[in-house]
Amino acid sequence: MSTLTLNINGKDYQVNVSNPSMPLLWVIRDLVGLTGTKYGCGIEVCGACTVLIDGQREHSCVFDASSAVGKKVVTIEGLSPDRSHPAQQAWIARQVPQCGFCQSGMLMSVAGAMNAGHHGSEIMSEVHNLCVCGTYQRIKEAAQSL
Amino acid sequence: MKTPIEINSNCAVAEAEAGSQNKQKPMSRRGFLVSAAGGLSLAFALPEVSKIAELQASTAVPGVVNTWLKIGTDESVTLTVGASEMGQGSLSALAQILAEELMVDYAKVLTVQAHPSLASPAPVGVSINTVGSSVTRTNFWKMRDAGAAAREMLVSAAMNANGDTTRANYTVSKGVVRHSSGTSWTYGSLADAASALPVPAGAPLVPDAQFQIIGKTQTRFDIPSKTDGSAVYGMDIRLPGMVYAIIKHGPTFGSTVATLPAAPSGMQVVPTRVVAGVGRGTEVTGAINAVAVVGSNTWDTWQAAKSLRVSWNTPASAANLNDAQFLADGKALLTGGTPFAAGAANGPGTVFTVEGSASAAATAMGASAKTIDAEYFLPYVAHATMEVLNCTVSYVPGVSCTIWAPTQSGKGVLSLAMQITGMAESQITVHTTYLGGGLGRKAEQDFVSQAIQVAMAVGKPVKLMWPRDEDFTRDQYRPLAVVHAKAGIDSSGNITGWTYRNVSPSILGQRGLSLPATGDSQGSEGSQNLPYNIGARLTEWVWHPSQIPVGFWRSVGASINTFCVENLIDELAAAANQDPYQFRRAKLTDPRWIAVLDAAANLGGWSTPPSAGRFRGIAIGTAFNSIVAQVVEISNVTSTGLRVNKVSLAIDCYLPVNPGQIEAQMQGGIVHGLNAALYGQQTFSGGTAKARNFNQSRMIRPNEMPQISVSIIPGPASASRTANLGGAGELGVPTFAPALANAFFKATGKRQRSLPFFPGSTMGGL
């Protein structure tokens, strides 16, 4: 058992893990208790688990929790305090989500692409997350305004 | 006649829970579940309510009531709905319909999730199965009647307060009743008095021409919470002291535990049995077909489950569960089979006559100038919802069993829990969470039954999860189908005769239902009552013996049969040297069908040739009372892939309640149909499914999305008073694959008669 200190959404959390290679996804969901970040495939194919680490998109399902120590982790809950991030606003305005399960990861990927300096249609050249509901058309329309 | 509205005493329960909830800050004003420090409690995110007058929406059909309505003295309007929200948006649509008749702002209606009940006659608020694209279409008139009755009761209360008996002196707008003198009363001020009044029968409805909410695009109440992580899915339930269970099935279908292994350090291993009514195919009631490893978090438990060495008994029959055998069995039944006989067992291998007669079809076919004879094959396809199967249960022996499930069948969960625990209904509470996709899979109860068993065994609240590989390999798949179709045309291009035999496993048969002479409705939908003038016909469905579990899958049979029927129609058009659109149009008689076909053709630019390198196909079909046609435009066809550039879809679902959501469902349905048509298949060897994760079962990503245009053909509400509206949730799926195949023929000259187009396609990492 080892104790890790993780900074998530601007707050420090101390978590006890049996193995420091426990993926960040499960630390965030089960130990910290933030459930907005989703498990989809566990093999970084679908992107439902996407979070930002020091501003960059990462797939938390394969990211060792210990590697996030000393870095700033942002999950969907920390994207904005009040759904005011432009991507969240665009998603609501365009009524993007259907079941919504992939959308946390989708929005974090979009936010990461925006952090990297991409705008409008460039964003969706960068984002390849899977949405089984097939909301891609509205996603593209929403991202167009960003 | 509709049943009168009654006061519902069950509402007291909801009110008590709402009271306890009010201490917490709701994450979403209309959220279903709100997380609390140290766990999660279910509550309705109601505003502060001091006293609530309750009006119960009811229905003409006992047993299918699933909604109820409360109007608060604080002006709140609360609609409790038993159906599930899995992205289809129909709960919002119900609020929309209600708001129109109640004459309140749509945004005023708070929609909350009901707990299912088994009481008979069913009290309002019980859950129905959320399947068959049914929620909006089957509740449309119930919502309207309930809203209108409640509105008239409130007006009557105002009239009583005024000592007046002339209804014509009163108008209603935005929850306020006004007398012609200018005096007004809010609904909240009238709610108590109204609750004491009799419920009027046949309250006048808002005429179509005066609709302000129905038929207009409205925003969905659940969407904001799906952009900030606050929407609570089954996977997100957290309870104090909760442990985590990871399911591990045997290596093949039909395998059972021989010896239970020792539990990993600090964990438990719980055997789970096949529960009566839940097992499919090779699964025998009572057999231990899986174990659950139980630990303190998902990851450690999952790792332990992976390395757990369980000794399994594998039946010899598993060796026959393979693709070659399924195909051989299907092909054999294209000609053989035992005719259905009243009183006989009519099991696998039985030939059921869906419609028509063999002799008439054969005679008609004899008069053909040309005949087309084709065999089609469709594979098993997994659901692969984004959220894997999971369920959370808190069980207190002799006291209570509380279940949180992402389920399309809350009522089924309740029955199952009573069966397994032996508890009374009053001791069991079922919370339907948001579903991270349903697609039919979450109407099943296998995962729920396991979670209940594990909770009973470990004495702590348990969240049980199927890792993605279990979700893929232990699905209840869309049935495979082997189809033989033959049709003839005369020298003028008229269809002379038609024979169609679909050999596929039986969804209803695997659920123990006795099949009628016409066979499994899930296998024949989309192959009968064809809209075309096709002359004499014989349509048959034959029960394929495969024991792979099959289940409901977004549009199921319609997705299978529409592929074959519309593929064959296209082939007949080519044989007749006619344009595929005009060939179809000439054989349609119903103006609704013609209008839908025309609308799709116009939207898809059929009258002008596509640009160089682009090819178009068209198809039309029906499911769940709606008609849909699509024009699919493709390019870049190679031996390993193709590009779908454009899809133009037209739908007639009678009155479109929320056009924006119908458009969304068409877009999503097209993608579902596209994924299945191009890549979707689950294959088997020795009783084991091969595709285990998304990397082995390709689906399109955002950059592969075609541009979709949707045309909604509105119809009058009155046309659906007896027929109900048409569905939307599944309607984008069935016509996509044949339209694609018909475009593929234009591009290549080859008929694609088997799916998927590109078997074995895999998907790389992000």
Image (spheres, coloured by chain):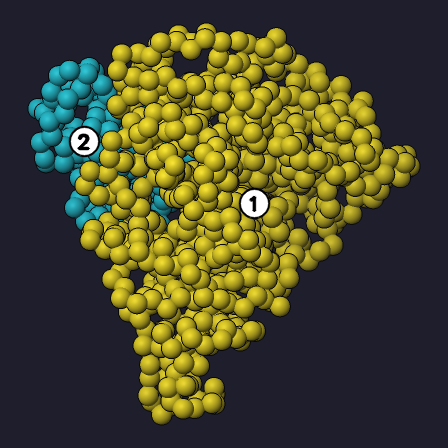
Chain colours: A cyan, B yellow
> Observer-nearest residue: B569 or B269?
B269
Image quadrant where one finds the N terminus of chain B:
bottom right
Q: Which residue is mark 2?
A: A32
> Where is residue B379 shown, x and y percent of the image?
60, 24
Q: Is residue B97 above or below residue B427?
A: below
> Where is residue B209 shown, x and y percent of the image?
51, 73
Horizontal side, residue B531 vs residue B735: left or right:
right
**Share a chain, discs 1 and 2?**
no
Residue positioned most to the front: B398
Image quadrant where one finds the C terminus of chain B:
top left
Q: Quadrant of residue B107?
A: bottom left
Label 1 to label 2, Cα distance in Å? Answer: 39 Å
Residue appearing at x 36%, y 22% in the figure: B246
Horizontal side, residue A110 vs residue B612: left or right:
left
Chain letter of disc 1 in the image = B
> Where is residue B533 shown, x and y percent of the image?
78, 47
What's the amino acid at mark 1? Gly
Residue appearing at x 60%, y 58% in the figure: B61
Mark 1 Cα shell of 10 Å, populated few (<14), some (14-19), many (≥20): some
Q: Is residue B64 above or below residue B105?
A: above
Chain letter of disc 2 in the image = A
Q: Which mark is residue B723?
A: none
Is residue B93 something that shows in the picture? no
Callout 1 secondary element: loop
Residue appearing at x 15%, y 30% in the figure: A73
> Where is residue B600 shown, x and y percent of the image?
58, 49
Q: Which mark is residue B132?
A: 1
Q: Quadrant of residue B243?
A: top left
> Observer-nearest residue: B103 or B421?
B421
Residue appearing at x 48%, y 12% in the figure: B257
Is residue B242 something that shows in the picture? yes
